[in-house]
Image (cartoon, rainbow, N blue to C red):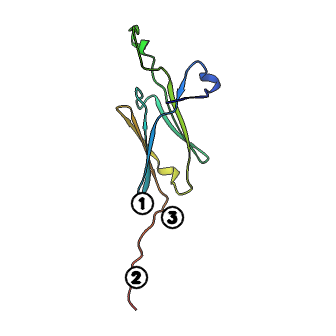
Amino acid sequence: MTTTNCAKENCDRRFFRPNVRILESAEAVELIAEVPGADEHSTDVTVENDTLTLTARVADPEADGRKVVYTELRDGDYRRSFQLSDKIDRQRIEARVKDGVLRVRMPKSDQAVSKKIAVLAG
């Protein structure tokens, strides 16, 4: 992961670029992102104009009263943006996060989904 520029209100935190995998079927595009430590309460998926943005805030390990003695894990939050194709139906995008994996399903619009046309005799 690499750090990215921080927003003005969050310059005291580091932002990491989560690793992703993007899969496409005839009906939808699915984006899978690694966001260890994030849950449904700290994860946001937004669409503004043609940009899909993923953000996830990860709680500091000291938040539960314990002191970090040693760590190789980096503290920081996740942020990544993607340009959306005009084939994506923005109104039907769904997102789920479980066990540090965010899945964003982006159905294709009805016009973008290919379908076979039956050819009749005569």
Q: In which quadrant will I find the C terminus?
A: bottom left
Secondary structure beneath label 2: loop
Residue placed under numbered mark 3 in the picture: 111
Are discs 1 and 2 less than 8 Å apart at CB?
A: no
Q: Report the residue at 45% width, 66% height from top.
A: 114
Q: Where residue 20 sits in the image (x, y, percent)?
A: 45, 40
Q: Where residue 76 sits in the image (x, y, percent)?
A: 50, 23
First in sequence, mark 2 or 3: give its number.
3
First in sequence, mark 3 or 1: give its number.
1
Q: Report the residue at 40% width, 10% height from top.
A: 70
On screen, residue 118 versus residue 8, left or right, reads: left
First in sequence, mark 1 or 2: give its number.
1
Question: Which amino acid type is marked by label 3?
Answer: Gln
Instruction: Choose between 107 and 100: the one closer to the eye.
Output: 100
Disc 3/disc 1 C-alpha distance (Å): 12 Å
Disc 2/disc 3 C-alpha distance (Å): 20 Å
Disc 1/disc 2 C-alpha distance (Å): 21 Å
Q: Report the residue at 38% width, 85% height from top.
A: 120
Residue placed under numbered mark 1 in the picture: 26
The answer to whether residue 53 is above or below residue 90 is above
Are discs 3 and 1 less than 8 Å apart at CB?
A: no
Q: Where residue 102 sits in the image (x, y, percent)?
A: 41, 37
Mark identifier at residue 119: 2
The answer to whether residue 121 is above or below residue 82 is below
